[in-house]
Amino acid sequence: MSDKALMTRAELELTQKMQREFPAGGVVHPNIIKELNDSPGLTARLTAFLQNRGRMQVVSTSGIITPPNGIVLPLTVPVNESRDWNAAVKTAGLSTGRGSVVWKIGDQFPPTVGVVERLEQLWLVNFGKGSRTSSSDAIAWGIGQHLVPASPRSCFAIAEHFSKLHVYLGMDPMAVVSLQKCSFEGRPLVARVWFDGSERSALLVWLWYHWDDDDWFAFVRELDS
C-alpha cells in the first residue's frame, strides 16, 4: 500500500457490506469475491479484511502500523484551512447547540490566509473494542508513526464529506477527534465531531479525558517527514 492510499465512499460501503455478510464459518461467498475483483480502486486492506476473518488490520509499506487490536483508516479529504471557523463548525456539526463553547474559540484556530481547499491525506486511528485511551497515549502512538494530530478543520471536513462514516463503519454512535489543544477559561480542551444517528455535533472535550472505543483520532504526516 502506498503512502497515497485512500479509501473511497464505495470502498467504505463495501467494507460495511462485508462486515454484515461475512459468514461465521469463514467461507467467503463467490459474489463477494467477484465484487472485490470488479472494484478497481480497492486496495489490499479489504483483501486483508477477508483473510483476517473480518478483523480489519492495516500494516502498510508507508510504515504506519496499527496499535494492538486497533484499526487505522486512511482517508483523503478536501480540507480548507482558510475557511471561517464558525462556518466550518456549522457545516460539520449541523446539530451543534447555539450555546456550545466550540463557537467561542475560533480565534485560537485562525484561518490560514492564502490557502485554498486541497486534498489532505488523513489517518483515523481507533484503539479497539473495550479500549480506554488517554490523549497522551494517542499522541505517542502518532509520534511513533511520524504522524501528528490533524487540525479541527480537518475533522470538520471529514464530517462534511463523510457524513455517514458511522454507518459505513457500523459504529453508531462514534466521534472523530482532533488532538490539537485549545483552551477555554483556562481549561485545556480538544475538538471532536460526534456522529449519532442522523445528528452530528461539534463540541469541545477535556484534553485529558480518557477516550472510549467509539473515538477515532485524526492524524496527518509530520511536515518534515
Image: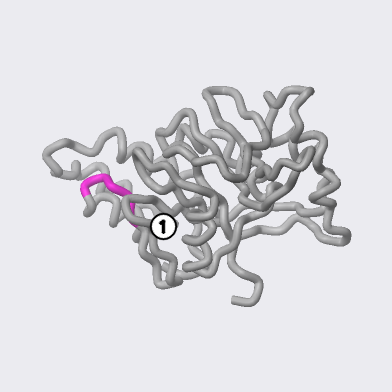
**Stretch of the chain drawn in magenta:** 53-57
Look at the image and tell me in which quarter the N terminus lies. Answer: bottom left
| Quadrant of the rendered image containing residue 202 | top right
Residue 30 in picture, x, y percent from top left: 20, 45
| Quadrant of the rendered image containing residue 45 | bottom left
Residue extending furthest toward the left? 25
Work out whether residue 122 or residue 51 is closer to the camera in this orientation and state it.
122
Residue type indicated by callout 1: Pro
Work out whether residue 165 or residue 155 is closer to the camera in this orientation and state it.
155
| Quadrant of the rendered image containing residue 61 | bottom left
Work out whether residue 38 or residue 109 is closer to the camera in this orientation and state it.
109
28 sits to left or right of 101? left
Look at the image and tell me in which quarter the C terminus lies. Answer: bottom right
- Residue 176 falls within the magenta-colored stretch: no
113 sits to left or right of 69? right
Work out whether residue 193 or residue 143 is closer to the camera in this orientation and state it.
143
Residue at the image position 41 percent from the left and 48 percent from the top:
127
145 sits to left or right of 21? right
Q: Which residue carries the number 1 mark?
A: 40
- 27 shown above or below 72: above
- 47 shown above or below 17: below
- 128 shown above or below 60: above
Residue 77 in picture, x, y percent from top left: 62, 52
Within 10 Å of the Cα at label 1, are there few (<14), some (14-19), or many (20+) other Cα atoms? few
Residue at the image position 50 percent from the left and 54 percent from the top:
138
- Residue 56 falls within the magenta-colored stretch: yes
Residue 5 in picture, x, y percent from top left: 48, 63
Residue at the image position 58 percent from the left and 66 percent from the top:
221
Secondary structure, magenta segment, majority class: loop
Residue 103 in picture, x, y percent from top left: 80, 34
- 210 shown above or below 124: above
Q: Secondary structure at mark 1?
A: loop
